[in-house]
Structure formats: structure tokens, C-alpha cells
Image (cartoon, helix red, strand yellow):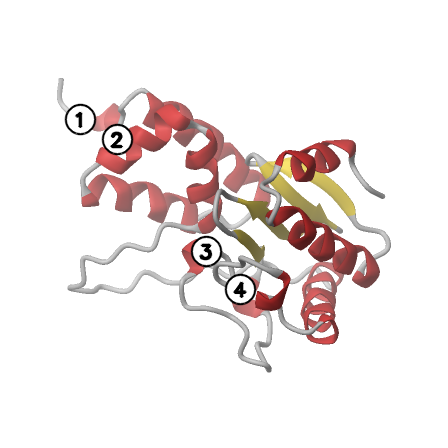
Amino acid sequence: MQNKQVDAYIAKAQPFAQPILNHIRKLIHTACPDVEEKIKWGFPNFDYKGVFCNMAGFKEHCSFGFWKGNLIKDTHNIFTKDQGAGNLGRITSLKDLPADKILLAYIKQAVELNDKGVKRQVKPKVATASKELVVPEFLTKALAKNKKAGKVFEAFSYSNKKEYVEWFNDAKTEETHDKRLEIALEWIAEGKSRNWKYMKK
């Protein structure tokens, strides 16, 4: 069943993005006729016994990702390593999308995971000397919608950003994830670090 809020989101998207978002949406409904559409974190999410995928349109590209992407069997090597741009990377035209048959198979995998009640896997923390921090796609999108929080987060130190990212990565359920995002956007907009409550005044 289509949601009018998603209709409005696509209508407001950049002209190049509209056919991309409409096509992805059509494939999702084909793969899962019982899908429920929602606007969460400021962009379209698709729910069947829990969120299983989402899409978004930006000024110069679109993104598409799976909630349990690390559990999807990437047999056609279509996933990108840049998770900040969704599982498929930056999509600028319909030509950037995999063949319909392939993408449908991946979407069906995501639906099946929810159908079987498979839980989202949280990657264990690995000590690394690298200073490269991968900001999750959902947070990038949420910060793009919340201009004030986005500006503050951009100015945050590496350690402040890392604390928030790790907090989200540790969320094992969708409900916990949603609550933390709501709180984080409020705190970030106020210039507060993740552990501001424990800092000496």
C-alpha cells in the first residue's frame, strides 16, 4: 500500500531523482506486495515485520540501502564499500541500478530475513589506528534534514562523532535505534557531545 507522504517526498525530489525513486519503489512493491511505507528519519522506509530497506533523494544523487545489509548475500557484487551512500553507492540515473531481476532478488532476501525474524547483526568493535570514521547512511540523511544539527556535527571533533556513531551501531533493535536518533539530533543541535551528562562543569 502506497503512502501519500512518500508520494509527496518523491514529488519534491530533484527531477533526475524522481524516476529513480519511483522505479525502486515499484520493485519493492513487486517483491513484497504486503509492504508498508513510512517516512522515518526524514526519508522513505519500507516495512514488513520491521523495516527492511529505505531510499532517499539528495541534490545530486539517490541512495538505496537495506536495514540488514550485512546479512544479504551479495552474490552479484552490487554492494559498495561506501556505506555512507547506501548499499548501492551514489545513484545518479536509472543506469546506475542493477538489473531489475537482480535487485528484486536482493529485496526478496531482505523481506525473507524479516519473515524469519532474523535479528540485525551489530559489528563488533575493532581496535584500529585509522582515523577514518564511516558515518552511517541514516545519520547522514537525518543530519541533512536537520540543518542546525548537521552544521554542529560537521564541526565536532573526531572523538565526538565516533561516540555517536558507536552508540547507533550498538542499537540491536529498530525501536532503540529510533529513540537514540531522536535524542542524538536534539543533543547535537544543542552542541552536546554523546557523554555530555558526565562531563565536569
- From the image, state whether disc 2 or disc 1 is nearer to you: 2
- From the image, state whether disc 3 or disc 1 is nearer to you: 3
- Label pair 3/4, CB-CB below 8 angstroms: yes
Sooner in the amino-acid sequence: mark 4 or mark 1: 4
Kind of residue at disc 4: Leu
Residue 69 in which image quadrant: bottom right
Q: How packed is label 2: few (under 14 Cα within 10 Å), some, or many (20 or more)?
A: many
Above or below 85: residue 116: below
Q: Please indicate whether residue 32 sits to the left or right of residue 107 in the image.
A: right
Q: How packed is label 3: few (under 14 Cα within 10 Å), some, or many (20 or more)?
A: many
Q: Which residue is mark 1?
A: 199
Kind of residue at disc 3: Ala
* Residue that lies at the very extreme toward the top in this rendered image: 201
Kind of residue at disc 1: Met
Q: Which residue is mark 3?
A: 85
Sooner in the amino-acid sequence: mark 4 or mark 2: 4
Q: Specify the label residue 88 is tagged with.
A: 4
Q: Identify the residue at image location x=61%, y=39%.
A: 13
Image x and y of residue 150, in percent: 35, 32
- Label pair 2/1, CB-CB below 8 angstroms: yes
Query: Looking at this view, is 158 or 24 the one in front?
Result: 24
Image x and y of residue 41, in percent: 55, 36
Label 3, label 4: how many angstroms apart (C-alpha)?
A: 7 Å
Q: Which residue is mark 2?
A: 193
- From the image, state whether disc 4 or disc 2 is nearer to you: 4
Query: Looking at this view, is 136 or 154 the one in front?
Result: 154
Label 3, label 1: how many angstroms apart (C-alpha)?
A: 33 Å
Q: How packed is label 1: few (under 14 Cα within 10 Å), some, or many (20 or more)?
A: few
Q: Please indicate whether residue 99 sits to the left or right of residue 86 in the image.
A: right
Kind of residue at disc 2: Ser
